[in-house]
Image (tube, rainbow, N blue to C red):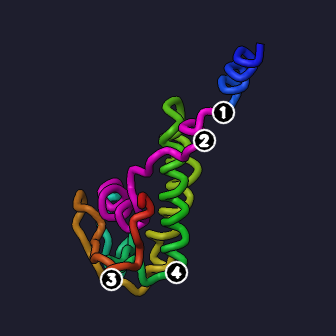
Amino acid sequence: MSDALDAFREDDEPDAAVDEAPELVYGSVDEFVREYLRHMYTRPVGGGNARYRWAAEWWRFPEAVARIEGLWRAWEHLRQDPANGSSTWWAEHADHHMPILLSPDGPFARSTDSCDPGEPLPYTAPPAGWFPDMRG
């Protein structure tokens, strides 16, 4: 009887793999910007009277880092929802933060970095160690 009870208890314990967080696709906010975000927003950006602004050194702007990190973390979470995660990310996260980031009076207001329509947003790598890979 004891063996049957022990087997029952073992089966009743939660699977350790279920409790683990899924592996990140992008190991850092920098990788998310470099590999994904700047390719999704191929707006023409520039200084002067340009409608959109972006800084290749986006990581120098604390508000931008906070907003983009939120976008990255939401993306990593919502990608797990195959039904509407992508749409939710766009509608509730990207469509909120990106107009603020790209605004001529947003955090990049003084940036003169530019790109043409259809090109990825400008990008300059941050100093080594600023955004360590969170995958371990």
Q: Amino acid at mark 3?
A: Pro
Q: Which percent across, then down, holds residue 79?
A: 48, 42
**Dot 3 alpha-carbon crowd within 10 angstroms: few under 14, some 14 to 19, many 20 or more:** few
Q: Earlier in the sequence, mark 1 or mark 3?
A: 1
Please give the range of residues in magenta.
Answer: 14-40
Q: In this figure, which residue is indicated by the disc labeled 1?
A: 14
Q: CA distance from mark 2 to mark 3?
A: 34 Å
Q: In this figure, which residue is indicated by the disc labeled 2?
A: 19
Q: Horizontal placement of 106 versus 115: left or right?
A: right
- Mark in front: 1 vs 3: 1
Q: CA distance from mark 4 to mark 1?
A: 40 Å
Q: Earlier in the sequence, mark 1 or mark 2?
A: 1
Q: Which percent across, then down, holds residue 47?
A: 33, 81
**Element type where label 2 sits in the image:** helix
The answer to whether mark 4 and mark 1 are in CB contact below 8 A is: no
Q: Amino acid at mark 2?
A: Asp
Q: Amino acid at mark 1?
A: Pro
Q: Horizontal placement of 126 versus 29: left or right?
A: left
At x 28%, y 71%, the residue is 122
**Element type where label 1 sits in the image:** loop
Nearer the observer, 120 or 116: 120
Q: CA distance from mark 1 to mark 2?
A: 8 Å
The answer to whether mark 1 and mark 2 are in CB contact below 8 A is: yes
Q: Quadrant of the C terminus?
A: bottom left
